Amino acid sequence: MTLSLTRKEAAAKIMVGLDKPDAEAALQVASRLEGTGCWVKVGMELFYAAGHEIVRELKKIGFKIFLDLKMHDIPNTVRGGARSIARMGVDMFNVHAAGGSAMMQAAMQGVNDAVEAGEAQSAPLVIAVTQLTSTSRETLNGEIGIAGSVEEAVVRYAVLAKHAGLQGVVASPLEVEAIKAACGEGFLTVTPGIRPAGAALGDQARVTTPREAVDGGTDYLVIGRPIVAEPDPAQALESILKELTES
Ligand SMILES: O=c1ccn([C@@H]2O[C@H](COP(=O)(O)O)[C@@H](O)[C@H]2O)c(=O)[nH]1
């Protein structure tokens, strides 16, 4: 089924991956996206270079922020890390489901610690990475050592994350239908692995177009290089929005 979205609805589903080496480069792109209504995603490259300050700057501009640091450590460390992240005022962050239930529950406890101590005004959404969208079945079976299909592995982690109290998962758009069937419509799916027709796949293994991702029921489309590595990021975003608003 082709879903017809308004421009506002489409923009609110897009998380632009600001994978840039420093604050200046990131803010240059962000300034071109200001006012569109899209989210921005701050990942390892930008956060390790520009830290809390870039989060503050992006919030000041008015963006909703997904902090994509994919925590994976012992529960006590993740609890402390989650508390620190909640204090920063981001809207969403993630952990690896491979860390197990106790670790994911610890992330939720860290958020509660921050809220109860009055350090965070509101609780960010906490989601779990299932299997990276760069992982193919061959890699999953032959290197990571998990048997079966990628979809089975993704759904197993999604169910684990749901039982641990998390609000959603990161997966490819190809697995959204199975995740929603197993975890319910309200369980969020945040999907990288988005490539407009003809765009280079790069290191992504499990991809769809923006239109296919939306029609498959995803909640959020994470899009990096097809926007931020283009000479005109605003124009690249516009053409994706056009694809999503045409029925
Ligand atoms: O499974 C995952 C988890 C996170 N990502 C992140 O999303 C963006 C995708 O960027 P593209 O340039 O559109 O490929 C990137 O920041 C990744 O770290 C992911 O791709 N897959």
Image (cartoon, rainbow, N blue to C red):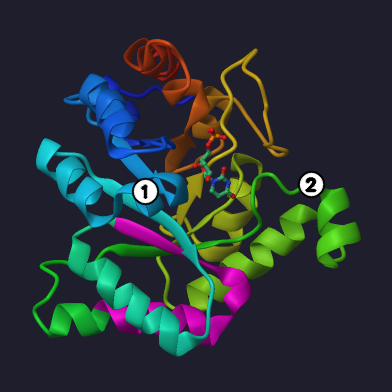
Q: Main secondary structure of the magenta part?
A: helix
> Can the viewer see residue 9?
no
Amino acid beneath label 1: Ala
In-front residue for pair 178/167 = 167
Q: Secondary structure at mark 2?
A: loop
Please tell me whether mark 1 sits on a helix, a strand or a loop: helix
Q: Residue at x 48, y 51 (%)?
A: 189
**Residue 109 is one of the magenta-drawn residues:** yes
Left or right position of 152 against 160 = right
Q: Residue at x 48, y 78 (%)?
A: 104
- Tell me if residue 177 comes above or below residue 15 in the rendering: below
Characterize the local packing of mark 1: few (<14), some (14-19) or many (20 or more) Cα atoms within 10 angstroms.
few
Which amino acid type is shown beneath numbered disc 2?
Answer: Ser
Residue 9, position in %: x, y? 29, 30
List x then y, in percent, for residue 50: 30, 48
Q: Are marks 1 and 2 in contact (CB under 8 Å)?
A: no
Q: Mark 1 and mark 2: span between their CA atoms?
A: 30 Å
Residue drawn at x 42%, y 20% is 244
Where is mark 2, residue-wise?
136
Relative to 132, is 166 on the left or the right? left
Residue behind mark 1: 49
User: In the image, is 40 to the left or to the right of 227?
Assistant: left
Compared with 94, 22 (above or below) is above
Does the magenta run of residues contain 23?
A: no
Horizontal arrangement in the rendering, residue 34 relative to residue 49 (left or right) = left
Quadrant for ligand 1 reads: top right
Visible in this render: residue 197? yes
The span shown in magenta is 92-111
Of residues 198 and 52, the one nearer the viewer is 52
Foreground disc of the pair 1, 2: 1
Q: How many marks?
A: 2
Quadrant placement of the C terminus: top left
